[in-house]
Image (cartoon, rainbow, N blue to C red):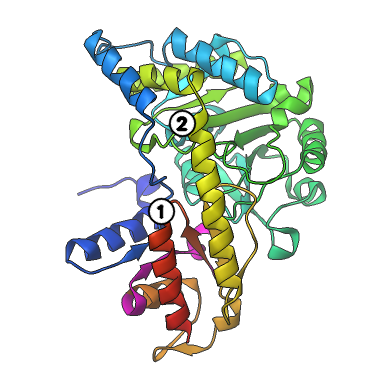
Amino acid sequence: MKISKKVSAIAPSATLAIDAKAKELKAQGIDVAGFGAGEPDFDTPQNIKDAAVRALNAGCTKYTPASGTLELKKAVCAKFARDNGLTYTPDQIVVSNGAKHSLVNIFMAICDPGDEVIIPAPYWVSYPEMVKLADGVPVSLETTAATHFKFTAEQLERAITPKTVALILNSPSNPTGMAYSREELEQIAKVCVKHGIYVVSDEIYEHLLYEGEHVSIASLGEDIKAQTIIVNGVSKTYAMTGWRIGYTASDAKLAKAMGNLQSHASSNPNSIAQAATVEALNGPQDSVAVMKAEFAKRRDYMVSRINAMNGVSCIAPHGAFYVFMSIEELVGKTLHGKVITGANDFAQILLEEAKVAVVPSEGFGIPNYVRWSYATSMETIQKGLDRLEAFLR
């Protein structure tokens, strides 16, 4: 049976694969401490669920405009004004089936065959595959722990070629949790404006920032705003991963193109989830602060425990809910009778011997790290780190 070369070349999601393996072991009755998927363990706030019930009872179960309801687009515009000091109009907003869908729309809309998209590494595993699906060429921009996994404007300048159409900017970042300062973003913006390239600014973790302020690069001036495509959604901030609502803000012409694409690919996002998202954006924000405070506690505990162990280390993340742990000191050593040649080996042996599931860094475009998600209970975190400590001993 024939499968296209394009789809055959797409790598499976490493994060979803490790999560599936952990769930498979759990289904067999094995006690696995899973740190794979980036999904808040909190329930969706009650006011949002109530809004969905009201929408159901009101008969909001039909098609909506393909790029989202006007009510939701207005709520998104209000959110940008309130949180980011940015002015957008509804014709600049496209609502999609999650931020992942939004990103696919973007690359399909801006990439011609051979166009290059610069992706700072470590990166979220899906970015390169999305670019390839759109016939673009992902160009990795390497960073190191010495710079807190952030690239500089000078590095970006050197990476740009005549084929470059866009830069992906993810702040706070998955998998490292690092965030760019206003000053760093100002320098990056200058380079992007100079070369006339898009900035695909993935801000899905903006409300999960534990120190400093979140700055959207689009807020730094009209020139950079015109070249920025902001991607956001409600999955992480409001524990709405299964509701599948993401959105973009961009130039109106580009928004129209993405809306046209979506009208043929998927039609409208879920009508009930759209109504619930209006409540999420416009309603009380108390739940966001509660989740953020709990995530901060978990982060501090995890960072402290890991940095007290021999052979592993990590930098305290600024935001999101991930700790990126270095295993460089363990590479070449033998653990539990097996030689550690890299992150894949380490993650596999840790799962087999200690029943702890973490995500190896090869899928993130960098060797010798593993990602831990602290979007899970403190009980699970304590259990997992106790097992890691015993495993290393």
> Between disc 2 and disc 1, whose residue precedes?
2
Q: Nearer the viewer, residue 254 or 77?
A: 77
Q: Position of residue 277 (x, y in %)?
A: 42, 22
Q: Nearer the viewer, residue 304 or 253?
A: 304
Magenta stretch bounds: 352-369
The crowd level at tag 2 (other Cα within 10 Å; few <14, some 14-19, many 20+) is many
Which is in the foreground here, disc 2 or disc 1?
1
| Residue type (three-letter) at the residue carrying disc 2 | Val
Is residue 115 in view? yes
Q: Is residue 363 magenta?
A: yes
Q: Residue at x 43, y 19 (%)?
A: 279
Q: Secondary structure at mark 1?
A: loop
Q: Is residue 251 magenta?
A: no
Q: Residue at x 47, y 33 (%)?
A: 287
Question: Is 141 located above or below residue 127 in the figure?
Answer: below
Q: Position of residue 246 (x, y in %)?
A: 46, 29
Question: Is 269 located above or below residue 124 in the figure?
Answer: above
Q: Position of residue 352 (x, y in %)?
A: 32, 76
Is residue 366 in view? no
Disc 1 target residue = 376
| Residue type (three-letter) at the residue carrying disc 1 | Thr
Q: Residue at x 50, y 61 (%)?
A: 371
Q: Secondary structure at mark 2?
A: loop
Question: Is 123 located above or below residue 283 in the figure?
Answer: below
Q: Nearer the viewer, residue 46 or 252?
A: 46
Q: State which quadrant residue 305 falls in.
A: bottom right
Q: Position of residue 367 (x, y in %)?
A: 56, 69
Q: Identify the mark at residue 234; answer none if there is no mark.
A: 2
Q: State which quadrant residue 4 falls in.
A: top left
